[in-house]
Amino acid sequence: MSIRENKNAFFSKASYEEWEKIVLKTLKSDSLETLYNETYEGIKLSPIYTIKDVKNRLEDAFICGSPPNNNWKISQKLCSSNWNELKQHLVEAKELGQETVSFDVDNFHDLQQLDFTEINKIFDLSCTPLLLFSKCNFQIIARRLLLMNTNHVFGSVAVDMISSQLEQGHLYKQEGQTWIEWKENLSKLDEKYPSLRTILIDSSSYHHSGANAVQELAITLSEAVFYIEELRKSGWEPYEAISKMIFHFSIGNNFFMEIAKLRAFRSLWKTIACAYQVPPEQSVPVISAETSAFTKSLLDPYTNILRSGNEAFAAVIGGVDYLHVTPFNSVSNPSDQFAMRIARNTQLLFREESYLDKVIDPAGGSFYIETLTFNLVEKAWELFQMIDSKGGIYSVLESGWLQDKVKETLKKRIEDLQTKEQLMIGVNAFRLDSNIKSLQKPKHHYRMKDDVIKIEPLELVRLAEKSESGEF
């Protein structure tokens, strides 16, 4: 065949029936059941998807699943316990592509040294967003920020009052002193910095306890509704509470599911905002994301570079506003600057060499991802309604019902790893023989406050831990 003939050649369109006939012949089977499998979300995956699977909802899905743009901010969370060292890290990070002021505030030893005026000399905070999430130090950070002699700071300084103490097995008492202080600081920050987002809905605590995508989405909606209703008691209108929210997700290793999770969230959030009669232009969600620590290996850390790259790619395709890529050896050495640079450069490669910021919703129109998105929307909404019928997120955590659901999913994940239904390279496949119990990362324990109630904890784990410690 000549070059001209090759250029003009085309493949005839094959029908689904023709495809099925050839597959059955190849498999030497009378059924396609062997090609179907079920996800942890209870979604049955088909070996092929067509336009019939998305029916007439394709256009609506694109609109709901699409962020206004794909210009995410590189937001590597710096880790240092020393003030002078942290300032040096901020200077270096800025030169190497960092686009937000983001660091681990709960790892910082003396928060009284924290000086936002000095940070402002490194990063101009009038044009560089803050991204500071805390589990236990929000009140102190808020007070330090309020001391700054400027009225224009944006981004987010926030805490998730519901999920922040789950690992410890604590829930702050409603109308307790911590809740009262939190509301007071929200009002003060809103008055001085109206563009700053101060309400965090952080699903990563549930993700790192083993939750599936449906559970993460339903919990996220439930927490958001809880905060809206809680702030209503203090005179906040729903649109005011929504304008202060930032949503944080961890992105796991199921590439297409994670893309669909972010797109499904936007569709679900649109429903919530409409229910509160908040116009679309006032309810566009701001999404922060991090690549998952749940999927990382301690024994074979270099495979984590590939895992984080895959997860970061899914986050960008899904359309996040801020992204932190977990350094490959963060399990054992969270402050390694070399690993941090590789993580940061992963994002720079996506932008500068792959041009992923040039396309809005690149997954839009994929029959597979659109169908996954629909499935997640339906299942997450069903679970959200179930949580609501049981009294909301606070009630299901207080009773332990939600913890039991998440732990069931975690148990299934670990069983699949043990039986090799799911493979992790360097963990249960092509692994190095070693017992590393002594290298397990210690868990944080914060001082218990007086205004908390004891609940069933949701401990943060890594999927590979049991295998690495020799349990299987």
Image (cartoon, rainbow, N blue to C red):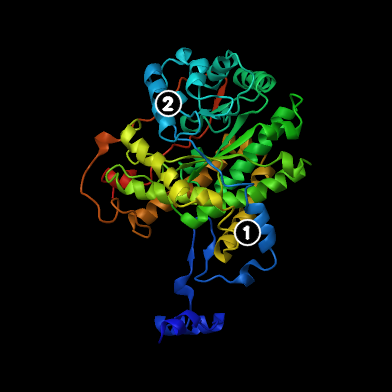
Residue at the farthest left position: 433
Kindly identify which numbered label has been placed on residue 334.
none
Indicate whether 220 appears above or below 255.
above
Looking at numbered disc 2 in the image, what kind of residue is underneath it?
Leu
SS at badge 1: helix
Considering only order in the chain, which callout, 1 or 2, is on the residue closer to the N terminus? 2
Query: Closest to the observer: 218 or 291?
Result: 291
User: For the point 49% across and 19% down, which residue is it?
Assistant: 121
Task: Please give the name of the residue rendered at 24% of the width and 39% of the height, measured from the top-left corner.
Answer: 436
> Can residue 69 be seen in the rendering of this structure?
yes
- In the rendered image, which residue does mark 2 sit on? 90
Answer above or below: position of 234 versus 251: above
Q: Quadrant of the N terminus?
A: bottom left
- Secondary structure beneath dot 2 equals helix
- Percent across and percent down for residue 293 are 41, 41
Amino acid type shown at disc 1:
Phe
- Image spot of residue 53 (x, y percent): 62, 69
Q: Residue 49 placed where, x, y %? A: 55, 70
**Tag nearer the camera, 2 or 1:** 2
Is residue 213 at all visible to an observer of this figure?
no
Read off the residue under disc 1: 374
**Left or right of 437 on screen, residue 218:** right
Q: Measuring 50% from the left and 82% from the top, which residue is drawn there?
A: 8
The residue at the far bottom in this view is: 1
The residue depicted at 66 percent of the width and 49 percent of the height is: 268
Choose between 456 and 351: the one closer to the eye: 351
52 vs 410, left or right, is right
Determine crowd level at label 2: few under 14, some 14-19, many 20+ residues with C-alpha closer than 10 A. many
Q: Are marks 2 and 1 in contact (CB under 8 Å)?
A: no
Q: CA distance from mark 2 to mark 1?
A: 41 Å
Q: At which x and y percent is residue 113? A: 45, 13
Disc 1: CA contacts within 10 A as few (<14), some (14-19) or many (>=20): many
